[in-house]
Amino acid sequence: MVFDELSHKVIGCCIEVHKFPGPGLLENAYKSCLASELQEIGLKYKMEYELPVIYKDKFIECGYRIDLLIEDCLIVELKSVEKLLAIHG
């Protein structure tokens, strides 16, 4: 699948999740809703995918987890906050 096509589908799923439950849920709830949307359109994903940090050519297991890894190429980090700050970017 072409990356632009994949990202377009994922954005569509995100918009659907944004429309339906509305604001105020915890990030984990939105993540589960998004996973449901991804599954519905047949996209493969991994939730809470563990990713090591590479430090001086060593893989350091430090508990870093990606919210969703979609089709083994697109990382999605969800935020459920009232206002995005520079630290979220």
Image (cartoon, helix red, strand yellow):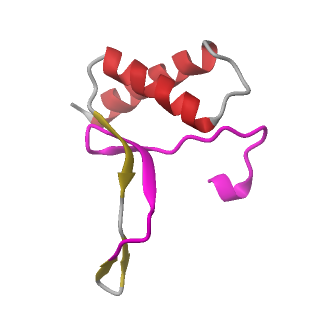
Q: Is residue 62 magenta?
A: yes
Q: Quadrant of residue 68?
A: top left
Q: Position of residue 36 (x, y in %)?
A: 41, 21
Magenta residue span: 60-89
Q: Residue at x 43, y 55 (%)?
A: 65
Above or below, 77 against 17 in this view is: below
Q: How many marks?
A: 0
Q: Position of residue 52 (x, y in %)?
A: 35, 67
Q: Position of residue 80 (x, y in %)?
A: 66, 38
Q: Is residue 37 magenta?
A: no
Position of residue 20 in the picture relative to residue 72 (left or right): right
Of all residues shown, which one is farthest toward the bottom? 56
Q: Residue at x 55, y 40 (%)?
A: 78
Q: Position of residue 85 (x, y in %)?
A: 74, 51
Above or below, 16 against 10 in this view is: above
Q: Quadrant of residue 22?
A: top right
Position of residue 5 in the picture relative to residue 85 (left or right): left
Position of residue 37 in the picture relative to residue 39 (left or right): right
Position of residue 14 in the picture relative to residue 22 (left or right): left
Above or below, 86 against 84 in this view is: below
Q: Residue at x 32, y 21 (%)?
A: 39
